[in-house]
Amino acid sequence: MKTRVLSGLIMVPLVLILYFRGIPLVLAAFIVSAISVYELLKGLSKIGIMGNIFISWGSLIALYACHFIVPGRHDYLTFWLVLSVIASFLGIFNIEKHRIEDALATIFSIVYIEFFIFHIVLIDEGSYGVLVWMVGITAIFTDIFAYFTGYYFGKHKLCPKLSPKKTIEGAMGGILGAVLFSIVFGLIVKIEIFPHMIVLGILGSIMGQLGDLTASSFKRKMGIKDYGNIIPGHGGILDRFDSIIFTAPTVYYYIQLILQR
């Protein structure tokens, strides 16, 4: 538990980044994406699938370059995604070395990590940019409450084949923790959409836990315990930020479909 708590302190810089938002948040999203792509493709290489890290990183650089070149516009996203997919398939023209699975792995890293995490940037530059906090709040407090609730009260396994230590009680505790601190956040900022904090707390927590379990299922298929070893007690960057991969798009599209309709 001591290692777990110490590792949790690493999330303190995340709070500072969310406070300043803007450029620090964009740079953080870029760095997390770059390292996560490396960790994911390295994990896939363990089972003989060789995604192209250079194409994936090139796609990432192009995405954030577009963000700075045409700020406030999102119409480049589809064009960027199409070109990234094309580039991924061009990467297997050397058919003696590469297979179709290698191209699909490259596309997978671009969509699953780069595109999904970029939604944090999209939230921040929108009219409800303050709600980017909901990505961090639901991820952090779901993890904290799920861990301690499961530690003290957990009896029923949630997905034993994916994550043996996770329990149904822990999952419910995680949702409760996310909702409580989402409400606290709403009271602090006093935004006019306060009732939506409860909904976002529930959705963010559920999607975050699904993101965590999804990343665990990938690791099981790859035959690895962690994606990396950068963070003591948590493994790699992708191990620590896997929940926000699903949470960020959830918050963004909630804003687009519900709050801005």
Image: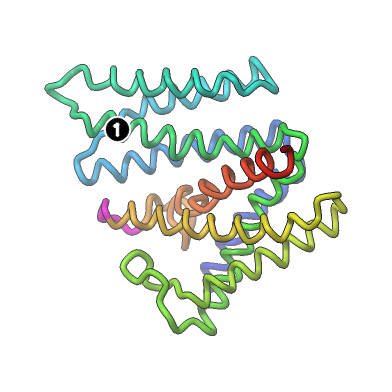
Judge left or right: residue 204 versus residue 129: left
| Quarter of the figure that contains the C terminus | top right
Seen as rendered, the residue at the extreme front is 261
Of residues 179 and 97, the one drawn nearer to the viewer in this rendering:
179
Q: In the picture shown, does residue 83 fall above or below 118? A: above
Q: Nearer the viewer, residue 224 or 83?
A: 83
Q: Does the stretch in magenta take in 235?
A: no
Callout count:
1
In percent of the image, x 67 and y 55: which residue is there?
A: 200
Q: Pick whichever, 37 or 121, lies toward us.
A: 121
Quadrant housing residue 58: top left
Please tell me how crowded label 1 is: few (under 14), some (14-19), or many (20+) other residues with Cα within 10 Å.
Answer: some
x and y percent of residue 237 in the render? Answer: 48, 48
Q: Where does residue 181 sit, x and y in percent of width and height?
A: 73, 63
SS for dot 1: helix
Q: Position of residue 165 (x, y in %)?
A: 41, 73
Residue at 68 percent of width and 51 percent of height: 134
> Is residue 214 depicted above or below 116 in this figure?
below
Foreground of the two, 11 or 214: 214
What secondary structure prevails in the magenta region? loop
Residue drawn at 27 percent across, 51 percent down: 222
Q: Amino acid at mark 1?
A: Leu
**Residues shaded magenta:** 221-225
Residue 225 picture location, percent across and down: 33, 59
Per the image, the residue denoted by label 1 is 104
The colour scheme is rainbow
Residue pictured at 40% horizontal, 76% vertical: 157
